[in-house]
Amino acid sequence: MYVVSLSYRVPQDIVDFHNAGHIAWLQKAFDDGVFIAAGRKVPRTGGLLLSQADRPALDACLAQDPFYTNGVADFEVMEFHAARVAPGYEILLDS
């Protein structure tokens, strides 16, 4: 599993300008099964994505994000192996 941390590198008005494209990209990525969770950081300095896709598929998807292609955010991809989860979250366990 991968945790992707996005950190904005531009002022909020530029983030807002590209947000509609980012949201459309995000919906397609969810529809394609790339992500299983997404949300904003608090305070709003970026976002986090959770993916169970393989690394090449994840990287190919991230390369299409308008936040990436327009230099809006830096991306950090961290691999994470879930060994234990609370009841109801078994889908997160590594197989």
Image (cartoon, rainbow, N blue to C red):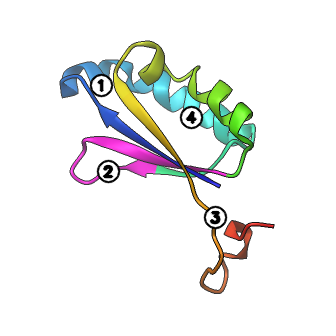
Q: Where does the image place residue 51, in percent across and percent down from the top left?
A: 63, 49
Q: Marks 2 and 3, how far apart in space?
A: 22 Å
Q: Where does the image place residue 5, in percent across and percent down from the top left?
A: 42, 44
Residue 61: assigned label: none
Q: How many C-alpha atoms fall within 10 Å of the one at disc 3: few (<14), some, or many (≥20)?
A: few
The answer to which of marks 4 and 1 sits earlier in the sequence is: 1
Q: Marks 4 and 3, how far apart in space?
A: 23 Å
**Relative to 8, is 37 on the left or the right?**
right
Give the camera-side residue of 72 and 82: 82
Name the image quarter holding the C terminus.
bottom right
- Which residue is identified by label 4? 26
Q: Which residues are magenta?
A: 39-51
Q: Magenta-highlighted stretch: main secondary structure?
A: strand
The answer to which of marks 4 and 3 sits earlier in the sequence is: 4
- Which residue is identified by label 3? 81
* Residue at x 56% of width, y 34% of height: 26
Give the camera-side residue of 17 and 4: 4
Instruction: Identify which amino acid the numbered label 1 is placed on.
Output: Val
Residue 41: assigned label: 2
